[in-house]
Image (cartoon, helix red, strand yellow):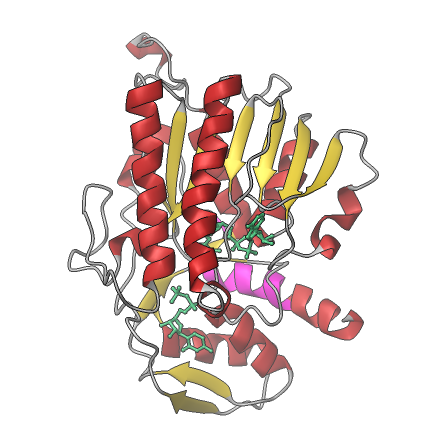
């Protein structure tokens, strides 16, 4: 069993990008566990609907703010999630995407330094680009195109990681870096453009399922609840003294900042996910094939041995179960949107 470190002690926690898909689930979980939560968002891809059920909680605060501008707040922990995650959204204004990643990281790290807060960066499997190593281990440096259409996101996130480690070395900021692999679940936008939301909407509306390329490319999909638990365990991992070996259920590695992979190691082809979604929805949709976007990674699968070993973390929600829950959400929200 995993034993939490200081997580159970109430904290004031800032979540940037808190009105987005992952951010809203994180805010909800942190509130449920007794923390004060400040949700900061500029609503570029986030939605008020994602956090409207939290607004009446007296421990919840909402701030409309753009992370490319500095801000000063008194907080204990910062989760830095602000950044559009879907390729269509981050490619809409690539210069802004780089600013969000670089200026956003700088401003949040500056804040963490000033108020001595622990800070987590929501990094990504895109750090590995189109990987030549499979599955991807944290020590792999990646194979990233620096000048392509995905570069604003990939390179932006890589610079953010660099900034996090430089602030740690230069200013002793208490950092955590998680590399998130494809995550899915309720509250993904209908027009998000990512594969799971696209296929579910298409299947529910009996429209053609659009596979880019031949569908032989792979991804590994983690259900949102598992991802949130993983992020909390990384953040909670103490940066303290070496603990006794007999105390091994508590964090025992000194100063563990990451980067650490979080994701589901079950690797599936895009074609098989299309068939699965059509099947679960009982849809009449046909599968059609379209051109593959530039620099689309061919394979992606996390090696999560580090998370298993140090955090006693691994995903528990199967792809089928996660899809069923997500499809239920989309059914309800299609009717109300
Ligand atoms: P999302 O688009 O739903 O959420 C991002 C949030 O950031 C939105 O609420 C958006 O409005 C907000 N935002 C964007 N620019 C901002 C700015 N300048 N100032 C303030 N807020 C801003 O995406 P998500 O899937 O919830 O992803 C959250 C984080 O996790 C992102 O940093 C993303 O890169 C990372 N990530 C996600 C995945 C995934 O599969 N979902 C995978 C890897 C990494
Ligand atoms: N994809 C697809 N059809 C869609 C949307 C995406 O075939 O309607 C493919 C896309 O080309 C990629 C995979 O699904 O190979 C995952 O795409 P997504 O945008 O969800 O995430 P990412 O490429 O960032 O992992």
Q: Is residue 210 above or below residue 253?
A: below
Instruction: Say which quarter of the image contains residue 27.
Output: top right
Magenta residue check for 324: yes
Q: Along the horizontal axis of the image, is 61 left or right of 111? A: right
Residue at the location (45% across, 80% down)? Answer: 275
Residue 208: give x, y in percent of width and height: 52, 90
Instruction: Say which quarter of the image contains residue 30.
Output: top right
For the magenta stretch, what is the residue range?
Answer: 316-327
Residue 322: give x, y in percent of width and height: 54, 59
Judged by its main secondary structure, the magenta piece is: helix
Q: Nearer the viewer, residue 158 or 224?
A: 158
Q: Along the horizontal axis of the image, is 117 left or right of 314? A: right
Q: Is residue 266 visible?
A: no
The quarter of the rendered structure image containing the N terminus is top left
Q: Is residue 324 above or below residue 286?
A: above
Residue at the location (79% across, 70% down)? Answer: 336
Residue at the location (47% across, 57% down)? Answer: 96
Magenta residue check for 175: no
Residue 49: give x, y in percent of width and height: 74, 56
């Amino acid at each position: 069993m995993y034993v939490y470190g200081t997580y159970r002690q109430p904290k004031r926690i800032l979540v940037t990008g808190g009105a987005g898909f992952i951010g809203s689930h994180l805010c909800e979980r942190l509130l449920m566990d007794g923390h004060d939560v400040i949700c900061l968002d500029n609503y570029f891809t986030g939605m008020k609907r994602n956090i409207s059920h939290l607004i009446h909680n007296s421990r919840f605060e909402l701030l409309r703010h753009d992370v490319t501008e500095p801000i000063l707040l008194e907080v204990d922990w910062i989760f830095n999630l602000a950044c559009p995650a879907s390729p269509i959204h981050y490619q809409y204004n690539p210069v802004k995407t780089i600013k969000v990643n670089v200026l956003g990281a700088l401003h949040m790290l500056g804040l963490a330094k000033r108020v001595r807060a622990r800070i987590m960066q929501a990094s990504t499997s895109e750090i590995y680009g189109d990987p030549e190593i499979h599955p991807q281990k944290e020590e792999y440096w990646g194979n990233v195109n620096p000048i392509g259409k995905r570069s604003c996101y990939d390179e932006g996130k890589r610079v953010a990681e660099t900034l996090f480690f430089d602030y740690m070395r230069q200013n002793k900021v208490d950092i955590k870096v998680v590399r998130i692999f494809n995550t899915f679940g309720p509250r993904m936008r209908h027009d998000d453009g990512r594969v799971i939301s696209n296929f579910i909407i298409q299947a529910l509306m009996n429209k053609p399922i659009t596979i880019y390329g031949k569908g032989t490319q792979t991804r590994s999909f983690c259900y949102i609840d598992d991802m949130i638990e993983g992020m909390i365990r990384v953040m909670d991992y103490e940066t303290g003294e070496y603990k006794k070996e007999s105390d091994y259920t508590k964090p025992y590695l000194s100063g563990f900042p990451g980067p650490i992979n979080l994701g589901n190691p079950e690797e599936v082809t895009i074609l098989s996910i299309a068939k699965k979604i059509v099947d679960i929805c009982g849809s009449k949709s046909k599968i059609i094939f379209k051109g593959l976007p530039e620099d689309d990674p061919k394979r992606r699968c996390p090696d999560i041995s580090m998370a298993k070993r140090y955090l006693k973390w691994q995903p528990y929600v199967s792809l089928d179960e996660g899809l069923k829950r997500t499809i239920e959400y989309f059914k309800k929200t299609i009717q109300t949107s």
